[in-house]
Image: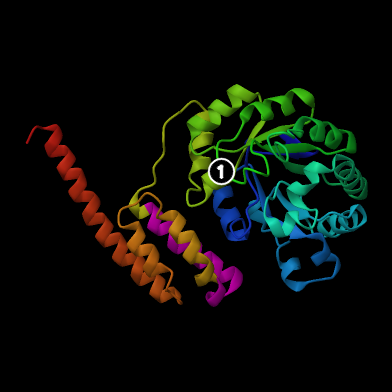
């Protein structure tokens, strides 16, 4: 798959997610087969005001390339200037956010609020595309609400503006992340434009991904919540695209090893104090669907140091291991009629 002059190793991308898709998590997903990673959304104003924390979000490791930095804002001139800053800082692709449903973003006329203002969205994208040489992409929603599904119209304007690819989340802003994603909207966008289209929404397994590709005809898949706590989904989808369609469930040891590795990467990137606080949320995601998860989430949320984290992970590995071994023995005996 190709976006402008950027060739992806696989037609599978990591969706931008606030508080999740920082450099350490992007590196993990890239290692597991993700073809394109996208940063957390970055404020155009923050860049232009030279906010230090905002600039830190532009950091890209050589091992995660190609990588996109996602910008948000509502001023065409500010976004064009911010795009130039991002390009100069070394990003491979610039993505523009028209999908965030969070009130504090929408109330500023940013994120998915721009789905209600196609002309302004066009002006923003055209100015950004004209301002830089690297590809500009955009992530949108199906529309503002069920009565205003305008993703195909927005996609055509984006293509006209010079956008190199578009990602479509099949939910409206009104839905947030509730209900089901409407994949027919993704198909309508694919039918409306010639640029590559990523389908996004309700992909939690390789089976989901293959079904989306078949039903919508989209060129690639963008995985968001399906990768949260389960970066192995990229490995599963890549295997499926190569003909091996089966569910990959990481073992207890693989999960716990990843928790500690992820934490070490965060510490190297952000320092122990911040890393441990942020890892509480990531660790809870890695424990989803596992035995005794509720109890250990509570304990993890009280941790403050790497050593404390390591001790609780070791204890959980032991206790959950005993539980899973006993469960396996019980099921084996039941199958044998004992």
> In the displayed image of the protein, which residue is found farthest to the left?
338
The residue that label 1 is drawn on is 178
Binning the other alpha carbons within 10 Å of mark 1 as few (below 14), some (14 to 19) or many (20 upward) gives few
Secondary structure mostly seen in the magenta stretch? helix
| Magenta stretch, residue numbers | 254-274
- In-front residue for pair 36/290: 290
Residue 266 within the segment the image draws in magenta? yes
Based on the picture, tell me whether residue 26 belongs to the magenta stretch.
no
Q: Quadrant of the N terminus?
A: top right
Give the colour scheme shown: rainbow
Q: Which residue corresponds to the image point at 44% horizontal and 59% vertical from the top-left?
A: 284
Residue 58 figure quarter: bottom right
- Residue 304 position, x and y percent, is 46, 77
The image quadrant where one finds the C terminus is top left
Examine the rendered structure and indicate whether residue 281 appears above or below residue 311.
Answer: above
Q: Position of residue 82 (x, y in %)?
A: 85, 58
The residue depicted at 74 percent of the width and 67 percent of the height is 54
**Residue 91 in picture, x, y percent from top left:** 77, 54
Side of 48 relative to 37 (left or right): right
């Amino acid at each position: 798959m190709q976006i402008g002059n950027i060739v992806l190793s696989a037609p599978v991308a990591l969706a931008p997610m606030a508080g999740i898709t920082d450099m350490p998590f992007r590196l993990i997903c890239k290692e597991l087969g993700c073809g394109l990673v996208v940063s957390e959304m970055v404020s155009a104003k923050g860049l232009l005001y030279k906010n230090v924390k905002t600039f830190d979000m532009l950091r890209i490791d050589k091992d995660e390339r190609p990588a996109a930095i996602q910008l948000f804002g509502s001023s065409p001139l500010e976004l064009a200037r911010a795009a130039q800053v991002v390009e100069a800082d070394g990003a491979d692709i610039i993505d523009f956010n028209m999908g965030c449903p969070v009130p504090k973003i929408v109330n500023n006329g940013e994120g998915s609020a721009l789905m209600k203002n196609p002309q302004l969205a066009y002006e923003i994208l055209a100015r950004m595309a004209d301002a830089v040489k690297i590809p500009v992409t955009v992530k949108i929603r199906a529309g503002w609400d069920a009565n205003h599904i305008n993703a195909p119209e927005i996609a055509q304007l984006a293509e006209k503006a010079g956008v190199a690819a578009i990602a479509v989340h099949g939910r409206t802003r009104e839905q947030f992340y509730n209900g089901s994603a409407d994949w027919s909207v993704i198909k309508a966008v694919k039918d409306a434009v010639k640029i590559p289209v990523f389908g996004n929404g309700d992909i939690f397994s390789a089976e989901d991904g293959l079904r989306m590709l078949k039903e919508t005809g989209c060129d690639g898949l963008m995985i968001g919540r399906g990768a949260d706590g389960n970066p192995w989904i990229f490995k599963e989808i890549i295997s499926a695209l190569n003909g091996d369609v089966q569910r990959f469930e990481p073992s207890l040891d693989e999960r716990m090893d990843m928790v500690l590795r992820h934490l070490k990467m965060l510490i190297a990137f952000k320092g122990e104090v911040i890393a441990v606080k942020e890892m509480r949320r990531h660790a809870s995601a890695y424990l989803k669907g596992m035995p005794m998860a509720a109890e250990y989430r509570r304990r993890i949320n009280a941790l403050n140091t790497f050593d404390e984290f390591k001790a609780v992970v070791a204890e959980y590995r032991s206790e959950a291991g005993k539980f899973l071994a006993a469960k396996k023995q019980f099921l084996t005996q039941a199958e044998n009629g004992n």
